[in-house]
Amino acid sequence: MRGKRIAVGVTGGIAAFKAATLVSRLSQLGADVRVIMTESATRFVTPLTFQILSRNHVAVDTFDEKDPSVVSHIDLADHADLIVIAPATANILAKMAHGLGDDMLSTTLLATRAPILVAPAMNVHMYENPVVQENLQILRDRGVFVIDPGEGMLACGYQGQGRMAEPEEIIARIEKILDASLPDWKGKRVVVTAGPTREPLDPVRYFTNRSSGKMGYAIAEAAARTGAEVVLISGPTSLTTPPGVRRVDVVRAEEMLQEVLKALPRADIIIKAAAVADYRPATVLDRKMKKRAEEVEIRMERTPDIAWEIGKRKGDRFLVGFAAETDDLEENAREKLRRKGMDLIVANDVTAEGAGFEVDTNIATVYDRNGPVAKWPKMSKEKMAERLIALIGERLNDR
Ligand code: PMT
């Protein structure tokens, strides 16, 4: 759930109190949660509750435009990876089924292209009313996901179906929906490289670069969610190993090469997001270099080009590289793709705001031998990793 952008629509029913637990759990799991409430929902729970639990502004009034640079309901619609409505009243289901947009939530729902999940909650007779059931069927036919209400004692005193699904069930369903865009790679083996390399000069100094490993770790995490066996060969970072991933730590480019070559025979897909140092000091001193002269010259030599080495040996394995560029993005990226025998290259302009090293987001264009195949605007590295895994999945299916 980490890095996922979830919009939670809360409508006016007593189950709105359970939405507080849902928002709290989603936030704890690392999702970026934006809550949109209807006016009637605010009669049950205050916007402040959701603001504190989500650490984000809560949208209620369509005309309360807080940020002049965006139109709120469009921004909320575009921002979301998924919208969940919990609880969903008969009223919001009817509005959705018939295209009404008369408040913040309904206009956001009309504007979004994200998957929508509804968790209906209402009195059993309302729920069983044929018009509510017809509206639910219209929504299902349109691809809206519905998590059926449970049976039991309802707040209105009736016994029957109408209780909103429990927050944990809703979260499990959200995870399933978000994973659906990923291919099924059970039985496949994926090797991902991430982070920088460090090239020592002496026991206390080294040359390195600004890579944090975030992009590569996000790729390893998304790859693991496909069911694949994932080996993450990582330079020094402060990140934690994603679940289900086997991590091999390295420091120097030479060590990264050796680990990649070890993993290669069993690999089906290799993704090289690491920022490997191109040069290393030609001599590594075994004692600390003393400060004597005003100026020093350090002779550097080339490190092995790992991607090129794999490109030579790859056979029918799928090789994806990254290109970190400051100039002539397309020309340089396509030249690297050809020279290193890659199937795809993800080019990021590391001078663009919100792209490249250290930040949580990236902006990239993906090329194959024939030219650009995808252009990805600014998005979280987690989202970009999923897009990349989905794209590789499509390419493998086409083979
Ligand atoms: O780690 P983050 O802070 O999240 O930042 C992400 C990133 C900017 C590091 C990542 O998105 C990225 O662009 N990684 C590749 C950086 C890089 O080394 O680019 P390059 O253009 O120098 O190299 C091209 C390709 O060859 C890369 O796949 C690289 O892994 C590979 N290479 C480069 C040199 C070398 N000696 N051996 C290699 O295998």
Image (tube, helix red, strand yellow):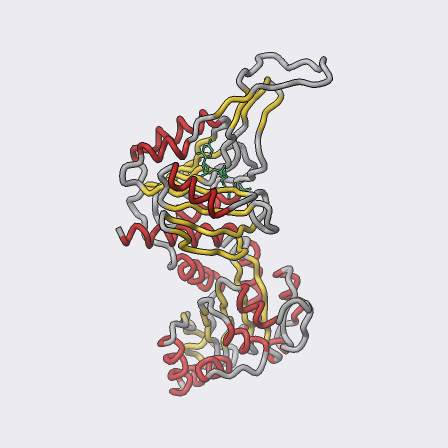
The answer to whether residue 158 shows anywhere in this view is no
As drawn, 87 above or below 174? below
**Residue 189 or 325: which is nearer the viewer?**
325
As drawn, 309 above or below 9? above
**Residue 252 or 97: which is nearer the viewer?**
252
Q: Which residue corresponds to the image point at 35% horizontal and 44% vertical from the top-left?
A: 343
Q: Position of residue 117 (x, y in %)?
A: 45, 69
Using residue 367 as the reference point, say whether residue 300 is left or right of it: right
Q: Which residue corresponds to the image point at 43% horizontal and 39% vertical from the top-left?
A: 336
**Residue 85 or 138: which is nearer the viewer?**
138
Q: Position of residue 355 (x, y in %)?
A: 56, 49
Using residue 186 as the reference point, say whether residue 383 is left or right of it: right
The answer to whether residue 120 shows anywhere in this view is yes
Which image quadrant for residue 53? bottom right
As drawn, 16 above or below 338? below
Q: Position of residue 120 (x, y in %)?
A: 46, 75
Q: Which residue corresponds to the image point at 38% horizontal and 82% vertical from the top-left?
A: 133
